[in-house]
Image (spheres, rainbow, N blue to C red):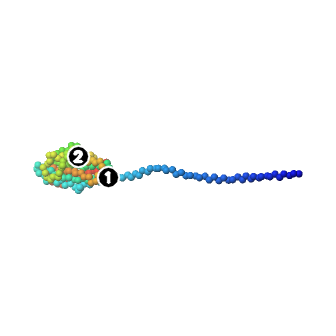
Amino acid sequence: MTQSIKKITIVSSIPLLAVALVAVFLTLQANAVTTSVNSTVGSIISVFTSSGTVAVNVTPTAGGVQTIANDIITVSTNNSAGYTLKINETAGSTALVSGGNSIPATSGTFASPIVQTVNTWGYRVDGVGSFGAGPTSAVSNAAISGSIKFAAVPVTASPDTIKTTSSTATNDTTNVWYGVAVNTATPSGSYTNNVTYTAIAN
C-alpha cells in the first residue's frame, strides 16, 4: 500500500500593526496688525500783566490835559490754534471812581472809538478794530491828542476781543494803552477801576 505523504505548508498570517507616523507640519503664517499710539497733549495758556497797576496820573489844568500809559499783556500757549484775548471791567461801573467822585468812561466803543474828550478815560490797542495804527506813546499831562482814539472798557458781560492768533505762542505781548483826560473840574483823589484780561485757547 502506497502511502503518500502530503506536504502541508502552513502559512500563518500574522497581522502587522502598522504604525503610521504622521508628520504634522505647523505652518506659521505672517499676520500683521497695526496699533495706534495716541497721546492727547492738553492745551494750556497763561496770561500776565506787566505790573498789575497802571499809573495814569494827571495834574489838571483849566483847559484839560491828558496822560497816557500802557499795560503789557503777555500770553503763552501751546494750543496749535492760538488764543483769543479779551478785555472788560470788573468793578461794576465803567467809570474811574474815587469815593463819591468819578471820571466817566469815554463814549467811544471798540467798534467806533473816538478822540478823547476832557474828564473821561478809556483804552486803546494800536492796529485793532477801528483804533488806528498809532503808534501810541506814553505822555504825561500833555495837550489832549486830536487824533488818538479811545473806547470805554466794556462791562463784564460784553468783553471786547483785542487780539486773536492762530498758532502757538510764547511770551506774546499786547500793549493796552489807557488815557485819562481831566481839567480842574475833576476833584483830586485816587480814581480806580479794575480791568480783567482773559486769554482763551482757540
Q: Amino acid at mark 1?
A: Asn
Residue 106 appears in the figure: no
Provide the residue designation for mark 1: 78
Say whether residue 50 is left or right of residue 66: right
Q: Measure the alpha-carbon separation of dots 1 and 2.
A: 24 Å
**Residue at 25 percent of width and 47 percent of height:** 162
What percent of the width, then of the height, locates residue 144? Answer: 14, 48
Choose the circle earlier in sequence order: 1 or 2: 1
Say whether residue 52 is left or right of residue 6: left
Front residue of 1 and 33: 1
**Residue at 74 percent of width and 53 percent of height:** 12
Dot 2 surroundings within 10 Å: few (below 14), some, or many (20 or more)? some
**Residue at 38 percent of width and 52 percent of height:** 40
Q: Amino acid at mark 2?
A: Val
- Nearest to the eye among marks 1 and 2: give it: 1
**Circle 1 — which element?**
loop
What percent of the width, then of the height, locates residue 8? Answer: 79, 52
Dot 1 surroundings within 10 Å: few (below 14), some, or many (20 or more)? some
Provide the residue designation for mark 2: 128
